[in-house]
Amino acid sequence: MKDFPSCFGENAVQIADSSSSNGNRSAQNLVTCVYQCRLRGRSCLITLAWSKNLMGQGLGVGIDDSSNQSLCKVEIKPWLFSKKKGSKTIELDDLSNIDVYWDLSAAKFGSGPEPLEGFYFAIVSNRQIILLLGDSKKEAIKKTNSVPAPSNAVFVAKREHIFGKKVFYTKVPFCDNGQLHDLMIECDTTNDPCLILRINKKNVMQVKCLQWKFRGNHTILVDGLPVQVFWDVYNWLFGTSLGSAVFMFKTTTSLSISSEKSQPVTDLDALNWSHSQRFPDPRSHHLGFSLFLYAWKQD
């Protein structure tokens, strides 16, 4: 198991802490994505933290090796103070270099900090693409002068903050290179509290008597894959107005599902999620993809 914030590197941990520990809603617009890849023959995790605040949008990048040691980190300041297009050369601990390239000058954004289209972000080592994101891949290959071959990066985890009054929307994949799905979480905390989960406008889960079932889990099917859904809405029902609900979606194989069914379904602490902010070790390929959603109620 690996602690989620530790993937960011030192500076990005500070970003994550500030977003989740205070009541400033504007500071919580943060999306964090984790990719497993191979860099110079060794396994590593690349973490991208897309952020948005009053100063603009920014990006933090961290690379950790398989022993959780930070290899490097870099921060691209909010666009208000830096160029939307550029590159940086970073020296690793073994004195080798990697190059980071980005072009967000024509990027289109939704309500969140993560670009949707019209951009590229690339990490290159020895003309080999380690990670390539965005829909402007041809421009990226030309700019980086890299060998046009697919990267070996695998999307293993994502954490996102979402906002709403009663209904919360986002678009999510449930596996690496998976199709984007419209995800809607609806929660009525008045009268008879109830939680409803919809994917592509279809009801896939409903929890009644939520005051007694404010924590729990359930398995749904998405694109033929079993996805375990964990929820913790205690803060919405009994906590402070500044607290968020937490949801985790974990795409798994039948092997990992059978191994976890032996644990009490109500004992979420035993599953090491939510409060401990941990996710399965991406090196355990059978554990698949993990998605964490922090849902904040707005007045």
Image (cartoon, helix red, strand yellow):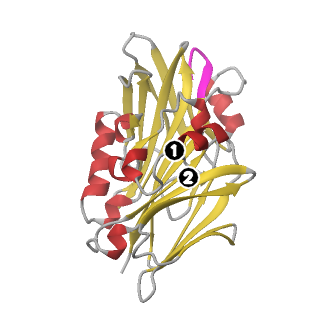
Q: Does 297 sit above or below residue 56?
A: below
Image spot of residue 211 (x, y percent): 39, 76
Mark 2–mark 1 Cα distance, whole angstroms, equals: 40 Å
* Residue hosting label 2: 115
Q: Which residues are magenta?
A: 124-130
Amino acid identity at mark 2: Pro
Query: How many numbered tags mark residues here?
Result: 2
Q: Residues within 10 Å of mark 1 (few under 14, many from 20)?
A: few
Q: Residues within 10 Å of mark 2 (few under 14, many from 20)?
A: some
Instruction: Work out whether residue 59 can be spotted.
Output: no
Asked if residue 23 lies in the magenta stretch, the reply is no
Under circle 2, the secondary element is: strand
Q: Earlier in the sequence, mark 2 or mark 1?
A: 2
Kindly identify the residue that appears in the image at 55 percent across and 12 percent down.
41
Magenta region's main secondary structure? strand
Asked if residue 126 lies in the magenta stretch, the reply is yes
Kindly identify the residue that appears in the image at 47 percent across and 78 percent down.
209
Q: Quadrant of the C terminus?
A: bottom left
Under circle 1, the secondary element is: loop
Tell which of 164 and 194 is nearer to you.
Answer: 194
Give residue 262's mark: 1
Res. 244 image quadrant: bottom left
Tell which of 229 and 153 is nearer to you.
Answer: 229
Res. 170 image quadrant: bottom right
Tell which of 147 and 289 is nearer to you.
Answer: 289
Res. 151 image quadrant: top right
Tell which of 298 and 291 is nearer to you.
Answer: 291
Kindly identify the residue that appears in the image at 69 percent across and 47 percent down.
178
Image spot of residue 110 (x, y percent): 55, 62
Image spot of residue 230 (x, y percent): 49, 57
Amino acid identity at mark 1: Ser
Image spot of residue 260 (x, y percent): 52, 43
